[in-house]
Image (cartoon, helix red, strand yellow):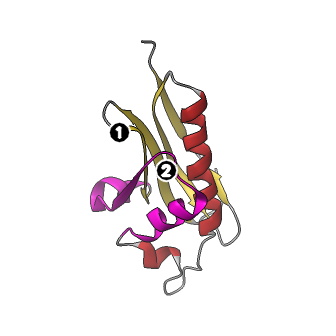
Amino acid sequence: MGRPGVEVIIGGLRDPVFNVTLMFGLGGVFTELLRDVSFRVWPITERDAVEMINEIRSSPLLRGYRSIPPVDVKSLAEIAVKLGEIFEKHSELHSADLNPVIAYQEGALVVDARFIVRED
């Protein structure tokens, strides 16, 4: 269990057309409730990941809102890129969900992860 912060989701899927596609959005119940996510086709850079993070409608929450401090977007971008690298190294990986990832002013913590592997 991590200390409170802003919960986000970072995921990926090996698509038959686009190959590895990465996803970012608010985590926890907000993923299903708001359906506010963005996608990128791998490979991406950290800069691409920051753009993906900033394009969700609820991104003002990540930059700080009322009593919620801004989060470390660079750390979230690094996690997204690392997840893409995992897909690249492991062709048997079909999908992955890191949810929640708790974002803090400094750093981020992956609290739960689910990986689906397929043997083809």
Nearer to the camera, 114 or 38: 38
Q: Nearer the viewer, mark 1 or mark 2?
A: 1
The quadrant holding residue 17 is top left
Q: Does 17 sit left or right of 40 as displayed?
A: left
109 drawn magenta = no
The amino acid type found where label 1 is placed reads: Phe
Q: Residue furthest bottom?
A: 66
Q: Residue at x 46, y 13 (%)?
A: 119
Task: Identify the element where label 2 is drawn.
Answer: strand
Residue 112 seen in this snapshot = no
Q: Residues within 10 Å of mark 2 (few under 14, many from 20)?
A: many
55 drawn magenta = yes
Q: Position of residue 69 (x, y in %)?
A: 59, 80
- CA separation in Å, label 1 and label 2: 18 Å
| For marks 1 and 2 on the same chain, the one whose residue lies earlier in the sequence | 2
Residue under pointer 1: 18
The quadrant holding residue 70 is bottom right
Q: Residue at x 40, y 69 (%)?
A: 55
- Say which mark, if any, is on residue 31: none
Residue under pointer 2: 10
Residue 25 seen in this snapshot = yes
**Picture layout, residue 48 above or below residue 71:** above
Q: Position of residue 110 (x, y in %)?
A: 61, 49
The amino acid type found where label 2 is placed reads: Ile
Q: What's drawn in magenta, residue-wise?
A: 28-56
**Picture layout, residue 47 above or below residue 66:** above
Nearer to the camera, 77 or 112: 77
**Picture layout, residue 65 above or below residue 78:** below
